Image (cartoon, rainbow, N blue to C red):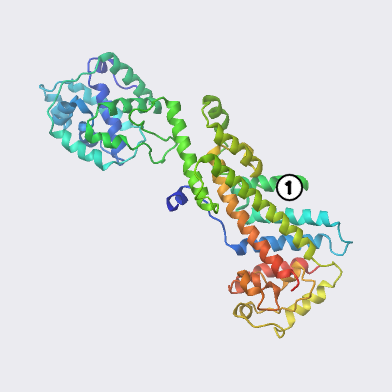
Amino acid sequence: MNGAIGGDLLLNCTDMSVLERQRAHLKYFNPSFDSPLAGFFADSSMINGGEMDGFLATAGLNLPMIYGETTVEVDPRMSIPLETTLGTGNFKKRKFDTVTKDCNEKKKMMNREEVTEGEEEEKSKITELNNGSPKSIKKMKIKAKKEENNCSNDSSKVTKELEKTDYIHVRARRGQATDSHSIAERVRREKISERMKFLQDLVPGCDKITGKAGMLDEIINYVQSLQRQIEFLSMKLAVVNPRPDFDMDDIFAKEVVSTPMTVVPSPEMVHSGYSHEMVNSGYSNEMVNSGYVHFNPMQQVETSSDPLSCFNNGQAPSMWDSHVQNLYGSLGV
Amino acid sequence: MASADKLINTYVPEKDVFALHFLQSLSNLRTQNPLNSPDKSIDRVRKIKKAAYVSMARAAGGTSRLWSRALLRRAAKDDNKSVRFSRRKRKVTWKISSKRKRSNQRAPVVEEAAERLRNLVPGGGGMETSKLMEETAHYIKCLSMQVKVMQCLVDGLSPK
């Protein structure tokens, strides 16, 4: 924030903080915030107690009028620094709430009222604001929130902002701690529970279990079981692998040349176009050579003498040609 | 949850990709020990298992996921090789230390389970709990995919 706001301009105006607040609200509710003035006025009704209604409602026309306006309760010069600071608005709140928009409309109808907040408070708020730290913004907004009427109380239910920038600005709920730590903590907890829900969908059989602890245990068990399965299957594969004493080249040639005579024709195998002369040893290289990198659901394994049709998922072999070429190349040794 | 999917990127490639990588690694294994005397079965198992994990990590996204990166690095270290990492989009943040210092209110239940999870998921040691859960989700998906592939293989190869 620029410290461009002249001290003297700020000091006497009790509405300053409210205006700043409104600016924050404005940024909060109007993502496409171009004209400081436009939003400025739209947001006038955000603050309850109608402190600023008068000022902004009348000044909703244009700036010069504010200058000339003598009946306005607030120092018209206030508008200038606000305008400058509005332009710099480094507020990153973007959330759009239609409920509060309606409230804005309603509040614009309300009469002006006196500003009630104490000056000291204002000053501190202002300086906080000028520093532009997200925490002060939160606090400020929280204070503003507490002053709002029913209509905007609905908006207080909403707590989370869309994360579009580096900061996540969160509005504290009514009656909850507004300590920045606890807010961050709550955000984090919500993140975690959201991810837990996601994991719940992923892990089978987790719908019945409620509670984080049980869920997490279940997840851990699942991961462990998957890892064990991999180990088990790799053991099986090691067993299934043949003795490495057959002639690779021979098999290579046989596979490329021979036609699928011995094979039970199935649609997938026709697609593959390679022979299935499967030596019993069934080493993985053969699978590679014969281009059986198509994968199939398990059911089809029994139907053919080609044990590798299980990999066939009916895709056109052309997709694998380049891969297969490479593999051929590597095995051409 | 459809909405969660948008926030958490858990895209896992098709089975074919995993299969291809796995077969490639197996064929590499083969060429490494062409006609030597067969290894002891334990070694063979270990090699195949390692090939399975490495191929899974590669298929799942190479160095673009934390767990796969950690897995590959671990594997490369064992073989005294080096892994080439693509440049990461985000710099490593120091979130961990600062966050942990600040607040003592981490739910102990969750954290204790997270510790166990960290031991299971590769690369989990340096992650915040929320990030850990993202990685776990992706890891689970990839693991199940790899299991399917290997199951297919075994069934295909086992004698009738």
Q: Label 1, secondary structure: give it.
A: helix
Give coordinates of residue A267: x percent, y percent. 59, 80
Q: Quadrant of the N terminus of chain A?
A: top left
In the rendered image, the quadrant that contains the C terminus of chain A is bottom right
Which of the two residues, A12 or B49, is positioned nearer the viewer here?
A: B49
- Please determine whether, in this image, residue B76 is positioned above or below residue A281: above
Structural crowding at the residue carrying mark 1, measured as other residues with C-alpha within 10 Å and reported as few (<14), some (14–19) or many (≥20): some
Which residue is at a point 79% across and 63% down the rendered structure image? A239
Height in image: B79 above or below A299?
Answer: above
Callout count: 1
Q: Is residue A200 left or right of residue A306?
A: left
Give the chain letter at badge 1: B
The amino acid sitting under disc 1 is Ala
Quarter of image, res A156: top left
From what the image shows, is residue A97 above or below residue A328?
Answer: above
Residue sitting at the far right:
B37
In percent of width and height, residue B142 lies at: 60, 54
**Residue A125 located left or right of residue A49:** right
Q: Is residue B55 visible?
A: yes
- Residue drawn at (33%, 31%) of the image: A88
Left or right: residue B37 versus residue B119 is right
Residue at x 12%, y 24% (from the top left corner): A68
Residue position marked by numbered label 1 in the rendering: B76
